[in-house]
C-alpha cells in the first residue's frame, strides 16, 4: 500500500455517511446531469461535470463548444464562472451535508482573473477542502456565521492556466 493510498483512505474516513452519499451522487453522471437539468438548466446546457470530489479537493470541467463561446471564439466568462463555482460549491455542500444543526451556505463574494483565452476544455480545481470543513466546524461550535475564501484554478489539458477565481462562502446555522 502506497503512502498516497493510505492518505486517501484517511480522507474517506473523515466523511460522514451523509457526506459520502453526497459525494457518490455528485460523481454519478446520470444523477448529476439530472440534477443540473432540473435545478441549474444553464449548467446542464453548458455540459459542466464533476470529475473528482474528495474531502480536500474538487475538480470540475467544462468544454469549449459553440454554445459556450463568446464572439471572440473563446469560452464565455460566465460559463467558466459556473464551472469554477461548482468546484468550490461541491466542497461547501459536501461539508454541510447532514449537519446537525442544519447549516445554510451562500456565496457572498467573487473575483476572477482571466489569464489566457480558453479555447478548449477547462478543468477547475479547488484544493481548499480543509478550509471549508474547518469553517463549517467553527460555525457549528460557535453558532456564529463563518466565511471562507476559496481559490480555484482553471487549466487546459496541457496545463495552461486560463483563469483564477476566488469565491467567498458564508456558512450560518439555520434557525429552527
Image (cartoon, grey):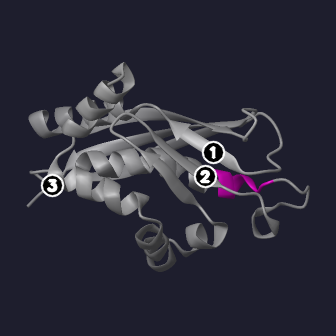
Q: Are marks 1 and 2 in contact (CB under 8 Å)?
A: yes
Query: Percent position (x, y) of residue 12?
Result: 26, 39
Q: Magenta span has 77?
A: yes
State how far apart marks 1 and 2 are (Cα): 4 Å
Q: Is residue 77 above or below residue 124?
A: below
Q: Which residues are magenta?
A: 75-80
Numbered mark located on residue 10 in the image:
none
Residue 58 falls left or right of residue 22: right
Seen at 35% across and 20% down, the residue is: 3
Name the dominant secondary structure of the magenta segment.
helix
> Which residue is disc 3 drawn over?
102
> Which residue is disc 2 drawn over?
61
> Which residue is disc 1 drawn over?
123
Helix, strand or loop at mark 2: strand
Seen at 79% across and 64% down, the residue is: 65
Depth-wise, is mark 3 or mark 2 nearer the camera?
A: 2
Seen at 63% across and 66% down, the residue is: 47
Question: Counting residues from the N terminus, which is met first, the one under dot 1 or under dot 2?
Answer: 2
State how far apart marks 3 and 2 are (Cα): 30 Å
Along the viewing direction, whichever of 55 and 167 lies nearer the viewer: 55
Amino acid at each position: 500500500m502506497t503512502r498516497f493510498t493510505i492518505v486517501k483512505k484517511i480522507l474517506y474516513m473523515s466523511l460522514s455517511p451523509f457526506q459520502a452519499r453526497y459525494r457518490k451522487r455528485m460523481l454519478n453522471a446520470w444523477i448529476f446531469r439530472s440534477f443540473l437539468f432540473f435545478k441549474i438548466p444553464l449548467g446542464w446546457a453548458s455540459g459542466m461535470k464533476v470529475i473528482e470530489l474528495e474531502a480536500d479537493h474538487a475538480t470540475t470541467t467544462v468544454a469549449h463548444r459553440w454554445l459556450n463561446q463568446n464572439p471572440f471564439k473563446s469560452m464565455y466568462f460566465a460559463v467558466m464562472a459556473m464551472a469554477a463555482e461548482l468546484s468550490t460549491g461541491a466542497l461547501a455542500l459536501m461539508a454541510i451535508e447532514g449537519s446537525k444543526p442544519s447549516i445554510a451556505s451562500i456565496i457572498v463574494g467573487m473575483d476572477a482573473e482571466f489569464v489566457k483565452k480558453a479555447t478548449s476544455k477547462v478543468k477547475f480545481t479547488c484544493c481548499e477542502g480543509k478550509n471549508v470543513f474547518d469553517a463549517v466546524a467553527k460555525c457549528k461550535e460557535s453558532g456564529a456565521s463563518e466565511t471562507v475564501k476559496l481559490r480555484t484554478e482553471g487549466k487546459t489539458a496541457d496545463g495552461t492556466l486560463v483563469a483564477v477565481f476566488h469565491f467567498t462562502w458564508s456558512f450560518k446555522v439555520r434557525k429552527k
